[in-house]
């Protein structure tokens, strides 16, 4: 059912883009549209060939990896949460920065994906607050943004984050970056 819904949604978005006269380059520039298309492609592979996603197979051993996504955009945060959950990760989404520290302390994640450009407060400003919490001492914090890589990397270093990830990265890259969080715990 989900693959059919995603296929229909991707077709609907594609039709809207064609009606607006947008180019293929514009469609690819939207990280969320690309993620949706990737989801559809992976679902079709599973349905047609009758086997699971190779990334999902490789991630079965990481089922206990806990990831907290902090983002002010519900659509973006929920999509990443679902994609990580489909691959066996225990992902939770918290919307906005209000209550984010308490959500992190309560959930005690292995890793946090922290949006940088939230309304009212930059995610990078939240890093020192999270670092001060003893309960989060082993938690790896990644700035998660669609910013250009160089400023994002600099911001991650300056804020004390463990690293950064682009929202436009392939899901395999995101999961690979999150794996050291589980290995560091063990």
Image: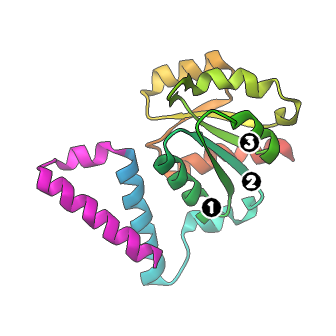
Residue drawn at x 54%, y 69% as measured from the top left: 53
Q: Is residue 43 above or below residue 154?
A: below
Residue drawn at x 68%, y 25% as measured from the top left: 127
Per the image, label 3 sits on a secondary structure element best described as helix
Label at residue 130: none
Residue drawn at x 62%, y 33% as measured from the top left: 97
Residue drawn at x 44%, y 34% as measured from the top left: 146
Q: Is residue 44 above or below residue 179?
A: below
Residue 25 lies, in percent from the top left, at: 22, 44
Residue 182 appears in view: yes
Q: Is residue 13 magenta?
A: yes
Dot 1 alpha-carbon crowd within 10 angstroms: few under 14, some 14 to 19, many 20 or more: some
Q: Overall secondary structure of the magenta stretch?
A: helix
Residue 26 lies, in percent from the top left, at: 23, 44
Position of 64 with respect to 175 (left or right) is right
Residue 44 appears in view: no
Going from N to C along the chain, the mark reached first, 3 or 2, is: 2
Mark 2 → mark 1, Cα distance in angstroms: 10 Å
Q: Residue furthest top?
A: 158
Going from N to C along the chain, the mark reached first, 2 or 1, is: 2
Q: Which residues are magenta?
A: 1-30
Q: Is residue 143 above or below residue 181?
A: above
Mark 3 → mark 1, Cα distance in angstroms: 18 Å
State the residue position of label 1.
85
State the residue position of label 2.
65
Label at residue 103: 3
């Amino acid at each position: 059912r989900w693959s059919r819904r995603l296929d229909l949604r991707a077709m609907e978005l594609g039709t809207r883009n064609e009606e607006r006269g947008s180019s293929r380059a514009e469609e690819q520039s939207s990280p969320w549209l690309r993620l949706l298309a990737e989801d559809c492609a992976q679902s079709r592979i599973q349905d047609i060939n009758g086997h699971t996603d190779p990334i999902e197979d490789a991630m079965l051993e990481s089922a206990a990896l806990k990831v907290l996504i902090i983002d002010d955009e519900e659509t973006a945060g929920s999509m990443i949460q679902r994609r990580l959950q489909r691959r066996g990760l225990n992902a939770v989404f918290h919307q906005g920065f209000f209550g984010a520290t308490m959500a992190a302390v309560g959930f005690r994640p292995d890793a946090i994906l922290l949006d940088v450009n939230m309304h009212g407060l930059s995610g990078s400003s939240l890093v020192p607050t999270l670092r001060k919490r003893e309960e989060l001492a082993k938690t790896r914090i990644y700035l998660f943004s669609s910013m250009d890589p160089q400023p994002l990397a600099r911001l991650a270093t300056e804020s004390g984050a463990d690293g950064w990830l682009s929202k436009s990265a392939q899901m395999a890259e995101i999961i690979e970056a999150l794996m050291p969080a589980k290995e560091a715990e063990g």
